[in-house]
Amino acid sequence: MRHDHLLTAKQLSRADIEAVLDRASEFAADPAAFRERHPELLLALCFFEPSTRTKMSFETAAKRLGGDIVDMGSVESSSVKKGESLADTVRVIEGYADAIVLRHPKQGAAQLASEYVDVPVVNAGDGAGHHPSQTLLDLYTIREKAGLDDLSIGILGDLKYGRTVHSLAHALTKFDARQHFISPESLKLPRSVRYDLHEAGANVREHESLDDVLPNLDVLYVTRIQRERFPDEEEYRKVAGKYSIDAETLARARDDLSIMHPLPRVDEIAPELDDTEHATYFSQAHNGVPVRMALLDSLL
Ligand code: CP
């Protein structure tokens, strides 16, 4: 992969994606073998929004490569609280670190940050925009479970505000995938993403009911309704709890259906599914470490 920054999944070719996933497989097979690979690495974690998986798996990835992290900490404890701009913050941090992992509530924040610094910026989620490193671990997981070609995937839930969905949908256009989007009318894919999928010639269908497509799916990618992005609580209440997957829902699913979720979940997937063969979401989260090791390795 020859990129200065990772800002959206759109910038990744199929060859880029396959190179990262192949490298991630090597890291996953023998993590101890790479402990000395980047002893000089200092990775800056700048999270302006909460995170468990993305932040901790980037930290683990840096340390497993022999490097370390510097953490901006919470917005509350940083000089962002005093009114410092994002541009100034990242210009200072590039003097402390070899790469910056940035999560921010504003769409386009990572793009903006990348224009001010010479070290690589990884977009770890920008508002309702993109989350490309999540997509790489999603693709790694799909490849392990079902393969990335001749794939039938259902993507369910908040398609409007779900940044993991936008990135995944773009990346899947590089493969032979049938994408079924299932959501309430008010949470359909944004027009810009639909336009991009159309331009890429993607094989896409939209549905309101999961029942329409469930029996044909290899993978069901479930997402949380992004309550924090709704401008109006009343609008959130209209769609909250609309989709909830439990054993009864899956009566018509294939035995080898993989259920994925970027997590955190709220009530979209019943805990009774956690010990079934369908549940892939925890191993999906664990795949974040080798995939982010591979990503850092390629960017550095
Ligand atoms: N999937 C994901 O981005 O999780 P976090 O918000 O915990 O990082």
Image (cartoon, helix red, strand yellow):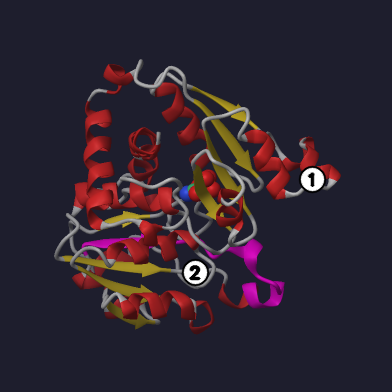
- Position of the C terminus, as image quadrant, is top left
Residue depicted at 56% across the width and 75% down the height: 239
Q: Quadrant of residue 225?
A: bottom right
> What secondary structure is marked by label 2?
loop
Q: Which mark is residue 158?
A: 2
Label 1 residue SS? loop
* Quarter residue 253 falls in: bottom left
Residue at 43% x, 74% y: name it.
Answer: 193
User: How dense is the environment of label 1, judged by Cα within 10 Å: few (below 14), some, or many (20 and up)?
Assistant: few
Q: Nearer the viewer, mark 1 or mark 2?
A: 1
Residue 52 visible in the shown view: no
For residue 47, side relative to residue 200 (left or right): right
Q: Residues within 10 Å of mark 2 (few under 14, many from 20)?
A: many
In the drawing, does residue 125 fall left or right of residue 61?
right
Q: Nearer the viewer, residue 267 or 101?
A: 101
Image location (x, y in percent) of residue 292: 39, 38
Distance, label 1 to label 2, CA atoms, is 32 Å
How many labels sit on residues? Answer: 2
Left or right side of 145 for 62: right
* Residue range highlighted in magenta: 218-236
Badge 1 is on which residue?
84
The amino acid type, in three-letter code, at marker 2 is Asp
Residue displayed at 47% across by 71% down:
159
Q: Which mark is residue 137?
A: none
Q: In x, y percent, where is residue 256? A: 18, 56
Q: Is residue 228 left or right of residue 218?
A: right
Q: Is residue 37 magenta?
A: no
* Residue 213 position (above or below residue 5): below
